[in-house]
Image (cartoon, rainbow, N blue to C red):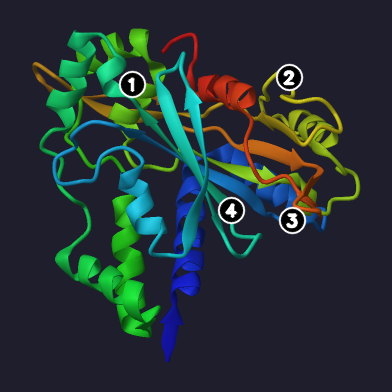
Amino acid sequence: MKTTAKQIMGELLNRLWEKYLERVSYAKIYAELVSKKGGKVVNDHIAFRTFNTHTGEQPEGIRAIKHIIETLEYKPVEKYVFKKKKLKATHFEHADELFPKIFVSQLEVEQLPQWAQNTINQTVKDTPYLLSDEAIELLGILRTEKTLTHEASKFLIDDLVNYFRRPWSIPFKDDVLKINDVSQYAAWTLLHGNSVNHFTAYINFQEVKEWPDLETTCKGLKDAGIPMKDTIEGQKGSKLQQSTTQAVKEEVEVRTASGVELIDWTYAYYELAQRDFIEENGKIKLFSGFLGEQATHLFDMTKTRDN
């Protein structure tokens, strides 16, 4: 029995979603509420953050994620630039529209102050490549033959799940705190690396009668005790509206002169997106892209008063 690239990607997405639910309680509550109300939990997109600088054996920047998901049948669709935040991004799509889009951003490290560049580069320069030789070989087979045996696909999925975590050494506490003053994106990435930055509910496919749109969903989640962003990005009826929960915090490891200690830091929020129809090449379809100004505001959701 052979397993296709699409099936492997589907299982990888499921495994990453399960790990994310364990870490982001607000997403778990959303999923439980939607299921109780007879609706469907469908994710619009997943986001990852990267450093565009030499990261040891791991490909730099967007390529860290791209080289894996392209083998699993995702294709780049559109590029974005966020000048003020010193970020570039690409969003990828799968032929199956119910597979979440994947939004990968990279921090242009060379645009930071020299001391910040040095700090990041020192932390990530000896990064190991988290995929085993066997997994690399299996990805190569998958690229040419499009399928793997069941046993091989199970091994590959386990290896791929392990890739989506922090790949470099534990950063120094002082470095994280100083970098955070320049770029909270950089501090987050030092701490969390390749981990999923956030998942996003696809409101269009939610099918909850009492939550027919983004506004009612946000209100419902707030009424259920989930701390929400105060505003919705995008006007009602526009091609894209987005909002989020607040980010959860978790204990993360940092290094100090006396060893390793734990500090509280933001991990992830759960985003929600509602899309409207547009005309493209004479066809009516749901808008599938992203809007720069909205994304700029949403990057800040991992920032808090304490960090």
Residue drawn at (72%, 44%), measured in percent from left and top? 287
Residue identified by numbered label 3: 35
Query: Which one is in front, 28 or 10?
Result: 10
How would you rate the neighbour count of disc 1 (Cα within 10 Å): few for under 14, some for 14-19, many for 20 or more? Answer: many
Task: Give the numbered dot on residue 187.
Answer: 1
Identity of the residue furthest to the front in this view = 281
Which of the image's four quarters has the N terminus? bottom left
Query: Disc 1 vs disc 2: Cβ atoms closer than 8 Å?
Result: no
Q: Tell me how far mark 1 sits from mark 3, CA to CA.
A: 35 Å
Judged by depth in the image, the label closer to the viewer, 4 or 2, is 4
Judged by depth in the image, the label closer to the viewer, 1 or 3, is 1
Query: Disc 3 vs disc 4: Cβ atoms closer than 8 Å?
Result: no
Name the side, left or right, on which 102 lies relative to 171.
right
Mark closest to the chain's N terminus, 2 or 3: 3
Mark closest to the chain's N terminus, 3 or 4: 3
Where residue 135 appears, as percent x and y from the top left, is 24, 67
Q: Tell me how far mark 4 sits from mark 2, CA to CA.
A: 24 Å
Residue identified by numbered label 4: 100
Residue identified by numbered label 2: 231
How would you rate the neighbour count of disc 4 (Cα within 10 Å): few for under 14, some for 14-19, many for 20 or more? Answer: many
Q: Secondary structure at mark 4?
A: loop
Where residue 63 appears, as percent x and y from the top left, is 32, 45
Which of the image's four quarters has the C terminus? top left
Where residue 179 appears, as percent x and y from the top left, is 29, 13
Residue drawn at (69%, 50%), measured in percent from left and top? 32
Q: Amino acid at mark 4?
A: Pro
Name the side, left or right, on which 121 lies relative to 231.
left
